[in-house]
Image (cartoon, grey):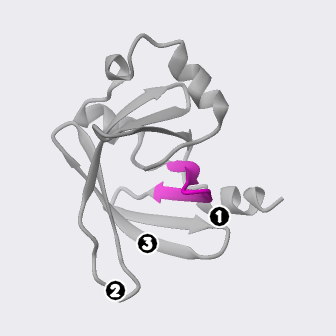
Amino acid sequence: MRFLAAAAVAALATCAHASDLELTADEIRARMIGNTIVGIEEGEFYAEYLSPNGAIYGRNRHEAYQGYWRIAGNKLCFAYESDSGKKVSWNCVYVALTGDKVIWNDDNETSFARLLPGRAEKTAAQASRR
């Protein structure tokens, strides 16, 4: 799903297990919501602001896009609109956080991102073009 550079991999290697750091629903809401997640998915940079209203305001190097987030149990769930404007199915993942390094685990795959404070998707997208 999502992954970032080797620095996040190195951070994970120093932890016993990512599951030891998994956030609860309350921790996800307190630490992730209202902030921006940046990473690389399928070779493409992304930056996504998780708005407190349940919306995702995202940008990649080419365009802006929107989606939705929700918390189900102790998982953070994402859904994005297709080109036809219809919401795609929800994808829910466990989230671990160590410093600003985000570790996603969806039972099939572990991937990585970085957490930036506040709404920074535009700034992060501009910086990725340099």
Q: Which residues are magenta?
A: 36-49
Q: Is residue 87 left or right of residue 83?
A: left
Distance, label 3 to label 2, CA atoms, is: 10 Å
For this orientation, the residue located farthest to the bottom is 84
Is 41 included in the stretch rendered in magenta? yes
Measuring 25% from the left and 30% from the top, which residue is drawn there?
A: 24
Nearest to N terminus: mark 3 or mark 1: 3
Amino acid residing under circle 2: Gly
Which quadrant is the C terminus positioned in? bottom right
User: Disc number at residue 85?
Assistant: 2
User: Disc number at residue 66?
Assistant: 3
Q: Mark 1 packing: few (<14 Cα in 10 Å), some, or many (20+)? A: some
Measuring 59% from the left and 41% from the top, which residue is drawn there?
A: 4
Distance, label 3 to label 1, CA atoms, is: 13 Å
Nearest to N terminus: mark 2 or mark 1: 2
**Chief secondary structure of the magenta span?**
strand
Q: Is residue 119 left or right of residue 80?
A: right
Amino acid residing under circle 3: Gln
Q: Is residue 41 left or right of residue 16?
A: right
Q: Nearer the viewer, mark 3 or mark 2?
A: 2
Distance, label 2 to label 1, CA atoms, is: 22 Å
Mark 1 lies on residue: 122
Residue 7 coordinates in the image, percent (x, y): 65, 28
Residue 82 coordinates in the image, percent (x, y): 37, 79
Q: Mark 3 packing: few (<14 Cα in 10 Å), some, or many (20+)? A: some
Is 81 included in the stretch rendered in magenta? no
Q: Nearer the viewer, mark 2 or mark 1?
A: 2
Q: Under tag 1, what secondary structure?
A: helix
